[in-house]
Image: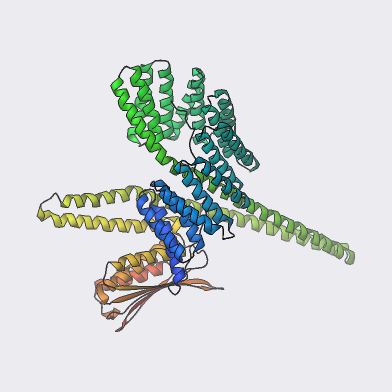
Amino acid sequence: MAHQYTGKFLLVSILCSVGYTSTGQSSAYSTDTAYVGNSLRAGEAIESSDAKKALGYYQKAYTVARRVNYARGYFEAVRLLAFALNNVGRSDEAKSIAQQALQQANTDTSKRYKMISHGALAITAARQGDLAEAIRQYAHMAEYVRALGRRDNEAVIYNNMAAIYQRQDLLDQAIAYNQKALAIRRTLPNNDRDIASSLFNIGAVYGVRNNYRQEANYTLQALRLLKPERDVDMVIRVYNNLGYVYRSTNKYDSSFFYLNKALVLSHKMGASSEEIRVLSNLAANHLDKKNANAARPFLVRARAIMDTLKPGLSEQQSWLAQMVDLSVLSGDYKSAYQWLEQYTNNKDSLANLSIREQLETYDQTMRRAEAREKIAEKQAQIARLEADQRRQTMWLWLAGMAVLALTAGGGLGWLYYRQRQKTAAAALLAAQQEQELTAIKSELAGQQKERTRISKEMHDDLGASMTAIGLLSEVAKTRVDALAVPEVGKISEISAAMVTSMNEIIWSLNTRNDSLNGLIAYIRAYAREFIDNTPLTLKIDIQESPDEVIIRGVDRRNMFLTVKEALNNVVKHAQAIEVTLRMRPQTNPTQGGTFHIDICDNGRGFDPASLAHIHRNGLTNMSLRMQESGGTCNIESTQAGTCVLVRFPY
């Protein structure tokens, strides 16, 4: 059986945050740059579920960014497009795009653009099997990472280069680059987990050499750095790997000891994937001892977990390998051949998913590195404040000495007493404010976490169910009597409407959308999609906010529903041929800002006082929603058309 946790080929995609801004319909360039940003975000949102559709979004963003010379959007599109093309087997196209990006990056002063270009070339070369070229591109990439001061990213690149050397069986080089990564991580603060990961990787290379003594040595070093209450996922992996190492050296007592610990932890934590691997290793120990009856219960238990929760391909592969051995040991060669065929197919599928899994791991590493950088910046700010405070204290002492020379001792004592009172009061006030701020932050974090959980569960559970209802009703149309088709069609329409409404609720709950520019982008996208299905012509005049403005989910939803109702009224009642949507944030330096939304049509107009009660309800609801959020909704109507004016102060 192949060594576990070894030979995993890491591919790196440096994450570069790109800001997408636009300044309204009046600027074609700004509209194009906003389109690039929206397309890239749309592709990322569906990449895991529909890779081909995501690829289409990336290609559109790439084309527009090149046409308008939008550098930041262009290189972000190159990063995502190269990865997506490699993922669907179009590596030649990915290579061509990455080479063009590198040529353009070399004419620019941005180290980040060069880093992205070399990263895309490295990923593509590795996917094409040109490992020497992948090493060369990673080496260039490391130069720019160092220039940008991203030491933790440099360590990850060295790990990737080590994985490539390991793939070529150049194990000395693999160990050397893993050692480089380890040396860097030991210089970073609060980094025990990453250090343990590097030690674990070095041990894995020794395991490929069948040098199990060194593998056990490095793995045990990693174990000593891990904290079970914090790093339980990695502790389980280390225990499982130690069980494999000791099994490989026929130290079955030690192997059973660590595997049983791993089994208890993985079952307690609900880590089903690791539990399957541990059960497979326990079965392997018994199979090594030619005891098929003892091995079978572990494999049956693993199968039960696999039937309940769909495991990853690597866990399936581990279980299939043991089923092959069990069938051979039992003399059932027909079953052994069938299990072996499944194992081979599983291995091919596992190779195709390796890139995505490693990128997700790298994303997590990048986020930890960015968090450490922010902490370091805060510590530097604190140090500067402390230095300023020391200087202020020194000047106060000098002033006190001057006063002491000019005034009587009694006057000096009184001043000193007053100063101490003020300092104590200020310290008490600062402590109270800090406690209040901490409580507010804790409450907000809890609310955001709960909103994120609710939106995810609605998307994963209710969304899937409603989509299934829609699909089943479409299928049912072809199988029922003609008399029942209208009712089934109605079910399909209602389920589609419910999916749309649920997506709007999920959007309002998701804390990542709590921004003014995010609201502007969402309303614009909805208006285009809604009006496209009507004979009306839509004009959009939009100006995004230059600042990051946070908008609560309930306020976003109230404004969106108000706009939605206004557009719906235009389509149903206005008898117009054109509708204009304007959105502009207007900032007052002393009073904050006001977000303006105008929906105007050139229809027949109306008198709000003369409308039927049912129509007045819709207009009343629009006004009530904006009042709930502290804003206003007014309607101006003449024979030349109608304008709905929404105002929201922020």
Which quarter of the rendered picture does the N terminus lie within? top left
Task: Give the residue displayed 10% in from the left and 55% down from the top.
Answer: 483
> Is any atom of residue 22 visible in this view?
yes
- Is 45 located above or below residue 177 in the figure? below
Res 618 → quadrant = bottom left
Drawn side of residue 448 relative to residue 502, left or right = right
Quick check: can you spot residue 447? no
> For this rendering, which residue is in front, 35 or 139?
139
Q: Name the outermost residue toward the bottom.
A: 639
Tell me residue 628's x, y (percent): 40, 67
**Is 24 on the left or on the right of 207, as rendered?**
left
Residue under the image location 26 percent in, 49 percent down: 468
Instruction: Give me the residue at 42% from left, 47% from top.
Output: 91
In the image, residue 124 lies at what x, y percent? 47, 46
Residue at image position (16%, 52%) is: 477
Q: Is residue 29 positioned above or below 47 on the image?
A: below
Q: Is residue 152 left or right of residue 518?
A: right
Which one is nearer the viewer's eye here, 11 or 153? Answer: 11
In the depicted structure, whether residue 604 falls above or below residue 506: below
Who is closer to the viewer here, 4 or 481? 4
Q: How is the image coloured?
A: rainbow
Question: Front-most of 405 and 25?
Answer: 25
Figure label count? 0
